[in-house]
Amino acid sequence: QVQLVESGGGLVQAGESLRLSCAASGDIFNINAMGWYRQAPGSQRELVALITSGGSTNYADSVKGRFTISRDNARNLVYLQMNSLKPEDTAVYYCNAHIALVAGPSSYEYWGQGTQVTVSS
């Protein structure tokens, strides 16, 4: 069974920084793309940042230049460094990963339980 567990959320003031971590565990053969999504109250879940197994990244326009996604393939970890946080970044942040359980082209999508990030003005 595969699990994604996030950590690092909390309450900060505008302009401060947070670092989110997500650890994947279980019977994993390989992890393809990993990413962070967020969902604010009354809003749909949206992509924040994505990183491929090769290290290519993609960011939402709203976080470009402020957030950095990275991963440690050897330890099945993905991080989100969030700088210059704004009140509009307040949301539950979810880790996402596409994980292969056996050799081959098939992978499955997994989600973490979410971690709350609150930015006060």
Image (cartoon, rainbow, N blue to C red):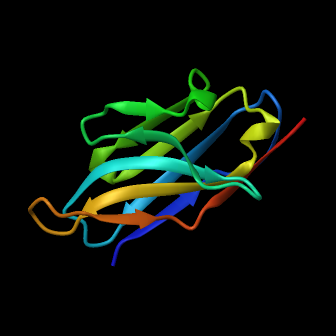
User: Is 53 placed left or right of 88 in the picture?
Assistant: left
In the current view of this chain or complex, which residue is farthest to the right? 121
User: Is 45 placed left or right of 70 in the picture?
Assistant: right
| Residue at image location 32% in from the left, 48% down from the top | 33
Residue 15: x, y in percent? 79, 27
| Residue at image location 77% in from the left, 58% down from the top | 41
In the image, 13 versus 60, the foreground residue is 60
Residue 30: x, y in percent? 21, 57
Q: In this picture, is 27 found above or below 77? A: below
Residue 71: x, y in percent? 38, 41
Q: In this picture, is 118 found above or below 109? A: above
| Residue at image location 61% in from the left, 51% down from the top | 38
| Residue at image location 57% in from the left, 68% down from the top | 113
User: Is 112 placed left or right of 54 in the picture?
Assistant: right
Q: In this picture, is 67 found above or below 97? A: above
Residue 93: x, y in percent? 61, 53
In the image, 5 versus 52, the foreground residue is 52
Tell me which corner region of the image, top left, top right, bottom left or bottom right, holds residue 18. top right
Tell me which corner region of the image, top left, top right, bottom left or bottom right, holds residue 55. top left
User: Is 7 placed left or right of 100 in the picture?
Assistant: right
In the current view of this chain or complex, which residue is farthest to the top? 65
